[in-house]
């Protein structure tokens, strides 16, 4: 069965999702979820909402889909325990170390890998399965072909977004809001810089996703769950969008033109897009929420309460000399109640009509009777109050069983110890071979070049941050050529790419894209076979110091803010603009962000200023930073040499820089 998974940003939205026909809902507690600005759920609301959902046969997945810091581990595990004790059917997790800690403490917990984990391949699913995940929320950028391959070969379930807002950046790889505005999207605080103008247009603002026209195709793939985005949306939005997708799933058909118009009237940004799914990626995907869109949006009928009922079969026995008995069966769950013993009637005996009418009075409950089988001996009498009590007790019994939670297995594992200790390492990434100055090879222990620009002049090759299954063969070919030309090391930003390197005999090193923000995450990637890993540039100095293991910190470079599946250069200035390395996006303040081509068609947006603190290196090393990582993106060979010279002498750079966050 293909599950319809709906958002719930509040208890009322959860009720609306049930009303709309959700098979499952997802929502977050007050912390550690990627929609911190939604109302979300207190512990008490979470318990009550999970019970309500389970009464209606709706599964509940709790989002713990933010990156965590070492000092938050205790609270993070406490939040997971609360959700599991409340009866959550699964936890949606984004932090690889947090996931490991949950499994170590609660081995029976069901884990789903959030889209923030950047899963976009079969190999990613295999790695996640080995870590204890049972489902992967697939990257929104995966095409129909990639999803077909995934469903055929993945060892775990696929969950796919079919409707709602689209991020222009690959999920989990966006640092724009964090680095530029101090509000981390990976921590649930995204300020949505993609919705702002750059120049005289909105090149980063995408229309909402809508795959309603592809429902039969999606169902045929064997996808486990179809997900609607919208935890920041109203209960009315959730109910009405869910109802349309419920209808399409039940009738196994594509949306009609009228239904697409209805979806647009509920909410749109100048229409919808299916560009990633159909591989029609381009300007047609762009859209903003205009006044015209707001004017054409229809007024949604206010949502007040759940009116949906769950069908039950009823079986009643009122027999001479035996206590009255009533069972309510809902699927495989049975509730039952035993009442008073009927007595011989002196005047008016019980009739089948009267008993049936009384027992079917389920109006104030979440249930409706699909059938009633009544066995009634003649000439008996039971007070009306006894029949009412029998019905109420049976409903209570069924409700209790539907909302029962399993005992939580909790363990106390030994404290983690790093696989590899911190060690002094200095590595660098150069975007082109021409950038590498003569002094670089003496200064750095290891230098990486991009896979598609590797020329054999250094020992390290950097894999693209995104490699779909459809691209894997080409990557293998280029890696084989790199090895034959002298490559011994690989810089990798996704756990799904690890086997590409190790199968070639390359030593793997973790890149920024792994989003390592705590010691547990560092331990996981080390256990997978990484020699070391670069920590997230979102970490402040004290948090860098907290992380154990073989780690490096970015001490120089323009931080990659976004990795885009589409080519901005082709859309804004043509291929020549992109190839000449002149392309940049300029915001409303006049600040320019360089854009560079990456791996054939993708674009990477870099920060306006490089992060740098050469005059503070002695202080940084004393604070615990041992491994150092340099990222050269837009610099000339002369500028690269000047940077190396400044770090050797520990003097300020002669141009504007961004400091490490304190």
Image: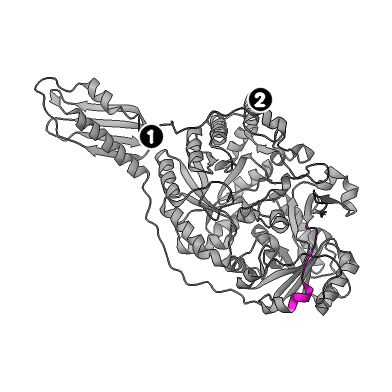
The image quadrant that residue 284 belongs to is top right
Q: Which residue is mark 2?
A: 257
Q: Which percent across, then down, holds residue 366?
A: 38, 34
Tag of residue 366: 1
Helix, strand, or loop for circle 2? Answer: helix
Nearer to us in this view, 650 or 73: 650
Nearer to us in this view, 138 or 480: 138
At a point 86% along the width and 65% down the height, the residue shown is 433
Indicate yes or no whether the magenta region holds residue 611: yes
Nearer to us in this view, 513 or 319: 513
At a point 69% along the width and 76% down the height, the residue shown is 626
At a point 68% along the width and 75% down the height, the residue shown is 625
In the depicted structure, whether residue 371 falls above or below residue 217: above
- What range of the chain is rendered magenta? 607-617
The image quadrant that residue 573 belongs to is top right
In the depicted structure, whether residue 281 falls above or below residue 448: above
In the depicted structure, whether residue 521 falls above or below residue 604: below
């Amino acid at each position: 069965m293909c599950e319809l998974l709906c958002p719930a940003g509040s208890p009322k939205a959860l009720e609306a999702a049930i009303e709309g026909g959700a098979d499952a809902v997802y929502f977050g507690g007050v912390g550690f979820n990627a929609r911190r600005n939604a109302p979300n759920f207190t512990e008490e609301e979470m318990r009550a909402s999970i019970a309500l959902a389970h009464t209606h046969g709706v599964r509940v997945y709790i989002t713990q889909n933010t990156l965590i810091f070492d000092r938050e581990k205790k609270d993070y595990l406490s939040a997971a325990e609360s959700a599991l004790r409340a009866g959550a059917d699964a936890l949606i997790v984004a932090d690889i170390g947090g996931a490991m800690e949950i499994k170590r403490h609660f081995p029976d917990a069901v884990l789903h890998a959030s889209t923030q984990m950047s899963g976009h391949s079969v190999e990613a699913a295999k790695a996640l399965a080995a870590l204890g995940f049972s489902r992967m929320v697939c990257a929104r950028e995966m095409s129909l072909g990639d999803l077909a391959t995934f469903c055929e070969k993945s060892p775990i379930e696929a969950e796919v977004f079919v409707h709602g807002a689209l991020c222009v950046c690959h999920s989990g790889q966006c640092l724009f809001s964090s680095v530029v505005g101090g509000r981390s999207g990976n921590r649930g605080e995204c300020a949505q810089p993609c919705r702002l103008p750059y120049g005289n247009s909105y090149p980063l603002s995408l229309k909402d996703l809508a795959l309603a026209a592809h429902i039969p195709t999606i169902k045929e793939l064997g996808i486990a769950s179809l997900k609607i985005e919208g935890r920041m949306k109203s209960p009315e939005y959730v109910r009405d969008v869910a109802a349309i997708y419920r209808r399409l799933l039940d009738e196994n058909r594509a949306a009609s033109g009228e239904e697409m118009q209805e979806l647009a009237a509920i909410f749109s940004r100048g229409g919808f897009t299916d560009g990633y799914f159909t591989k029609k990626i381009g300007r047609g995907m762009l859209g903003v929420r205009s006044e015209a869109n707001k004017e054409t949006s229809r007024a949604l009928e206010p949502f007040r309460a759940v009116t949906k009922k769950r069908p039950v079969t009823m079986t009643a026995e009122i027999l001479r000399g035996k206590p009255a008995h009533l069972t309510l069966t809902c699927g495989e769950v049975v509730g039952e109640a035993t009442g008073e013993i009927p007595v011989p009637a002196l005047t008016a005996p019980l009739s089948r009509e009267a008993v049936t009418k009384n027992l079917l009075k389920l109006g104030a409950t979440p249930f409706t009777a699909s059938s009633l089988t009544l066995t009634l001996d003649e000439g008996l009498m039971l007070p009306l109050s006894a029949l009412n009590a029998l019905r109420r007790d049976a409903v209570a019994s069924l409700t209790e069983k539907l909302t029962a939670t399993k005992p939580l297995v909790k363990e106390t594992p030994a404290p983690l110890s790093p696989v590899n200790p911190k060690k002094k390492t200095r590595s660098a990434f150069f975007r082109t071979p021409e950038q590498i100055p003569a002094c670089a090879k003496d200064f750095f222990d290891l230098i990486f070049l991009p896979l598609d620009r590797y020329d054999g002049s250094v020992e390290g090759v950097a894999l693209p941050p995104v490699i779909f299954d459809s691209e894997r063969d080409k990557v293998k070919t280029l890696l084989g050529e790199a090895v034959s030309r002298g490559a011994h090391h690989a810089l990798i930003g996704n756990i799904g790419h690890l086997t590409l390197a190790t199968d070639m005999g390359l030593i793997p090193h973790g890149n920024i894209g792994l989003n390592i923000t705590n010691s547990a995450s560092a331990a996981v990637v080390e256990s997978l076979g990484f020699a070391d890993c670069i920590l997230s540039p979102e970490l402040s100095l004290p948090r860098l110091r907290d992380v154990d293991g073989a780690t490096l910190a970015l001490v120089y470079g323009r931080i990659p803010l976004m990795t885009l599946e589409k080519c901005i250069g082709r859309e804004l200035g043509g291929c020549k603009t992109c190839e000449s390395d002149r392309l940049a996006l300029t915001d409303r303040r006049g600040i320019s962000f360089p854009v560079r081509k990456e791996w054939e068609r993708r674009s990477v947006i870099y920060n306006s200023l490089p992060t740098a603190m050469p005059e503070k290196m002695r202080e940084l090393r004393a604070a615990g930073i041992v491994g150092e990582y340099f990222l050269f993106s837009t610099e000339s060979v002369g500028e690269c040499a000047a940077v190396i010279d400044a770090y050797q002498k520990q003097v300020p750079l002669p141009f504007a820089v961004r400091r490490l966050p304190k």
